Amino acid sequence: MSMSRREFAQLMGLAGAAGMLPLQGFAAKKQSSELYEVPSFGNVRLLHITDCHAQLMPVYFREPNVNLGIGGARGNAPHLVGDKLLNHFGIRANSLEAHAFTSLNYDSAALKYGKVGGFAHIKTLINRLRQSYGSENTLLLDGGDTWQGSGTAYKTRGMDMVEASNDLGVDIMTGHWEFTYHQEEVLKNIKAFNGEFLAQNVFITEDALFEGADDYIHDEDSGRVFKPYTIREMGGARIAVIGQCFPRTKIANPARFIPDWTFDIYDDSLQELVDEIRGSESVDAVIVISHNGMDVDLEMARRVSGVDVILGGHTHDGIPAPTIVKNNGGKTLVCNVGSNGKFVGVMDLDIRAGKVQDFRYRLLPVFSDLIPADSQMTKLIEDIRAPHMPWLSEELAVADELMFRRGNFNGTFDQVICDALRNVNDAHISLSPGFRWGTTVLKGQMVTMEHVLDQTCLTYPETYVREMKGEELKLILEDVADNLFNPDPYLQSGGDMVRVGGFDYVCDPTQSIGKRISEMTLDNGEKVEASKSYKVSGWATVGSRSEGADIWDVVATHLRDRKVASIDKLNTPKLKNVAGNPGIMDYS
Amino acid sequence: MMNRRKVIKALATGGALIGASVLMPGLALAGWNKEAFGSENQGMAMKSLLGAEPAASADVSLKAPSIAENGAVVPVTVKTAVANVESISIFVEGNPTPLVAEFMIPAGTKAEVSTRIRMGKTSNITAVVKADGQLLSASQETKVTIGGCGG
């Protein structure tokens, strides 16, 4: 077990107090084998992972209690939380699955069921799912966001995850945060990757072509930087797999790392490609491995025909069953398999007579205590981590309450980050990005440097302090809210709302841009004035590089100083017009 | 078949083409419609440049990103298969002066133009094709965002 003795003792104490002392051997073999006993169906098995964010070790990860759907998305997957999600998918309350897919009773259930993910455990599960089906008829697809999110990924520029992906046996991947390294590093990592890196929607810029970047790109005529699709034969069928990277990479992340490449959804190019593949490659099925985000995938499935399955990522939605989208060409199944190594999607397809006849789908939560670790992967992970252990293992503060991020608005760990920025940088107001990665720390657990890195580790970590007028702040909030709540998925960017420290506001997600944010009020009760300047601190600037200390050092300084990770006040907006929305619960 | 790089290199380095591009500003200046290019209102700019406001047409193809990667250089392509195209003009409703460009299409030329336009904020882009005295248009909204905060 990876817990320190002290952590373990604390957990036992808490569990005892809550009357939830974990039964010795919850990892009872019977339960384990039932959970992971997936009957074989059809002739092709697609195994799908995504958005692990470089979490090599088992972690805790709490699903959101706020994931609002606006407009047509209201009340539909993935915008369901808690009981609403359980009822929609027919999942029994208080079950292991209920814990995996929702935040209901999170604290006690996390103690009971333990950590999730970890590459050594995922590998054992994947191998079992491959061997029981016939490995030659299986494919392992990774939707990306694999090379970023941990201290070791940062130090090795993503190469640790390439090695781990190779050991896991990933056949095909696409990407998003992969592009937060310099483009030369991205190419180098892809070269070291044993599988295929696919992207139909990344093109070379005309400037770069002129400068002679043509020596490495996949296809000069189309301008595609990467191979757009691959053909695999298995189970007597021919399958095309197309890659779709995150289309907003140069907007959501620094464009300066990848100056020569340009991204978009390009659904017209995708349609052309699908038609071309269907016309000339005599395939029986077309699969897209996508990092669009689930709302964009659903919209793309409505617009583009001829795709049988979209295996999606980006929005970190652990959705127990595919959404079936009808379009001109028939129907497309849209899946999304969560994040942080918590889930493995299993899509069994019955492909006969040139088409997909039927399917069976399971989204398996990876409970680390139920699946033995693969020894080869364990060794690889130990080797990767060994040089960095003094950095990663520093104990900073005890968590006074559950520390998490995921959700549309401030999580508790975000508040710690926002408090740290204000405290260490002596600012009135702080801003922190609404990323969807970042693991969970249980109450009473020691917050280590590794946990702080789980929340903050990216390649543009520098903090800033600058004067900002109230109207600028409002503009930022409106802009980010529109990226989240615009009813047109193609105009969304997939992150959550920017986290704030030092002030609160009122948000009406159902309004249009410019009208969602109001009543911005400082913690001392004063209204934020449009023309008044405030000292603002933040991090992860996408434009130009900031000058301040790395965010993890700022947070670590704050936590070392406090010794306890606690929150005096959670800065989260008062919401309007969300009553009855199935994408919110326990929000006040 | 000429590939993209060769076309781009030819465009940039070809002597004759360079000559043409040097001459272009002069040519454009000769036909410069100061009133249209200076107008702060899209409807007025259209009337001033083209004599009337256009009618939306499926025959005009306008390609622009739904969200711009960089508002300072938004790639836009306009093409049409209709006959006798005289000009293609591009308007950005939210810009201080909406008329961005007017391309004169000589007889017998394929009516397809690509350029990069500057946009200060989210706005509708409208492409107008003048052909056989008719005004046909296509519009699309392109979002300009401050970025960041991706998941």
Image (spheres, coloured by chain):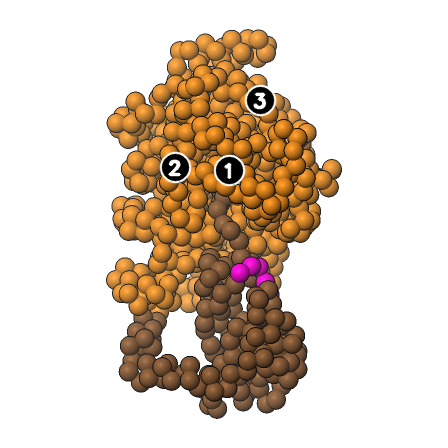
Chain colours: A orange, B brown
User: What SS does tag 2 mark?
Assistant: loop
Is residue A407 placed above or below A175 in the rendered structure?
above
Q: Position of residue A24 (x, y in %)?
A: 48, 11
Labels 2 and 1: the sequence-earlier one: 1
Residue A413 seen in render: no
Q: Position of residue A67 (x, y in %)?
A: 61, 38
- Name the kind of residue labelled 1 in the image: Val
Q: Are marks 2 and 3 on the same chain?
A: yes
> Does the residue at mark 1 contact the one at mark 3 (Cβ under 8 Å)?
no
Alpha carbons under labels 2 and 1: distance apart: 13 Å
Residue neighbourhood size for the residue with mark 1, other residues' Cα within 10 Å, grouped as few (<14), some (14–19), many (≥20): many
Q: Are marks 1 and 3 on the same chain?
A: yes
- Which quadrant of the figure contains the N terminus of chain A? top left
Where on the picture, by quarter, is residue B114?
Answer: bottom left
Subunit that carries the residue with mark 1: A
Labels 1 and 3: the sequence-earlier one: 1
- The span picked out in magenta is B120-124
Q: Position of residue A513 (x, y in %)?
A: 64, 51
User: What SS does tag 3 mark?
Assistant: loop
Subunit that carries the residue with mark 3: A
Where on the picture, by quarter, is residue A374?
Answer: top left
User: What SS does tag 1 mark?
Assistant: strand
Q: Nearer the viewer, residue A435 or A542?
A: A542
Q: Which residue is mark 1?
A: A536
- Name the kind of residue labelled 3 in the image: Asp
Q: Nearer the viewer, residue A27 or A52?
A: A52
Q: Which residue is mark 2?
A: A548
User: What residue sits 53% from the left and 11% below the top?
Assistant: A14
Q: Which residue is mark 3?
A: A568
